[in-house]
Image: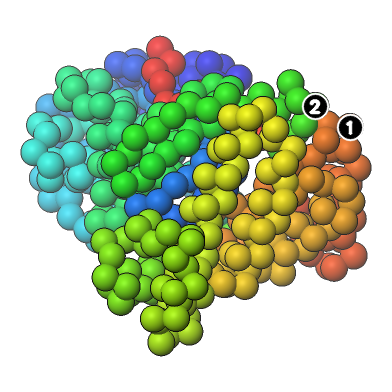
Amino acid sequence: MTSAVGAGVAAEFQELYGAAPEGVWAAPGRVNLIGEYTDFNEGLVLPLALPHTAVAAVSRRDDGLLRLHSRDVPGGVVRLDVAALAPGTGTGWAAYPAGVVWALREAGHPVGGADLHLASTVPTGAGLSSSAALEVVTALALNELYGLGLTRPELARLAQRAENGFVGVPCGVMDQMASACAAEGHALYLDTRDLSYRQVPFDLAGHGLRLLVVDTRVEHALGDGAYAERRAGCEAGARALGVRALRDVEVAHLPEALGRLSDGTVRRYVRHVVTDNERVARTIALLDAGDPRAAGPLLVEGHASLRDDLRVSCPELDLAVESAVAAGALGARMTGGGFGGAAVVLVEEADAEAVAGAVTKAFAAAGFAEPRVFAAVAAAGARRLR
């Protein structure tokens, strides 16, 4: 599927720019099994790459011009002067690849101009990291074309820098690391403090299980301030507790730590981050022990924490989780930044269709838009297609 998309994108590039691209690359979106809002607190996360990808056909230019075009967005070619790139000079979808060029150059890497043509199958606004896929596919292509020699974690950090500094979203590094470093058939157990990671076998089918993604079709926007407010609250909690990051608060010491915090909102944020780090560690232990079924209740716990302590859920996400569990799912929770987007649902293979139908029926009864439900299969990370 991705190879066919790559061939199509290469042909469109030639028609658009008048010459064949130097190469075609792909980078996936991701879904996060557990560990939410922990990445910017130097904590633990457990994402997996999706088969849905951003695909980019790219060639270098020697005149300092950056030309960007998307198959998926109306409008013509966006033209930017590489030397003039600065926060605020790119808007809309083009800010993500432009931000990567800016971040690479800001870090001292000799990146000149480029022509890019992009197409993406990652649903936008669904919390599945469509923006990180755009960033990582651009970073990987330019790294190869300009011979920069950067490692995958280094590319992920630069892609995060693009989103933080150029686009203006204060995200952590999980999305970019998942897109850049994930392996097919595995979840990525990532320590965001030092970017060390381990590929964890994630063969749900072998256990008679399936992971469903429920895209509520409620688009979220992390640049609206709510995400930044929670990050600021977490950082305030770390300062008040005298630690580098909330990662350093052990769950055994959580009651004492919470007792030292006077701000109720900060207290809730701290409780979520510390307990979600613990849920990641418990989930990993279950996967390592060959017992993924037992992770179901941890997903439900995680959703309750995101809903009640972090308060980033929404009625559609809550209904997706509640109706899935009521229909027999082993567990479910919202995934991603929240305020819309998607939920993940762990189900027995035999129950998958019934659970998906129950969620869809519940949405119809509530007057919500019909959700998009699909199976999440652990796919490969960013790669060159041709």
Residue 39, given in percent of the width and then of the height, sits at: 40, 52
Circles 2 and 1, Cβ within 8 Å, touching? The answer is yes
**Circle 1 residue:** 350
User: What residue appears at the point 63 percent right and 36 percent down from the top-left corner?
Assistant: 286
Quarter-of-image position of residue 158: top left
The answer to whether residue 283 is left or right of residue 141 is right
Decide which of tag 2 and tag 1 comes sooner along the chain. 2
- Kindly identify the amino acid type of the residue bearing the numbered disc 1: Ala
The answer to whether residue 164 is left or right of residue 371 is left
User: What residue appears at the point 43 percent right and 59 percent down from the top-left corner?
Assistant: 250
Q: How many marks?
A: 2
Q: Which mark is residue 180?
A: none
Q: Residues within 10 Å of mark 1 (few under 14, many from 20)?
A: few
Residue 258, given in percent of the width and then of the height, sits at: 45, 76
**Circle 2 residue:** 208
Name the secondary structure under disc 2.
loop
- Kindly identify the amino acid type of the residue bearing the numbered disc 2: Gly
Quarter-of-image position of residue 205: top right
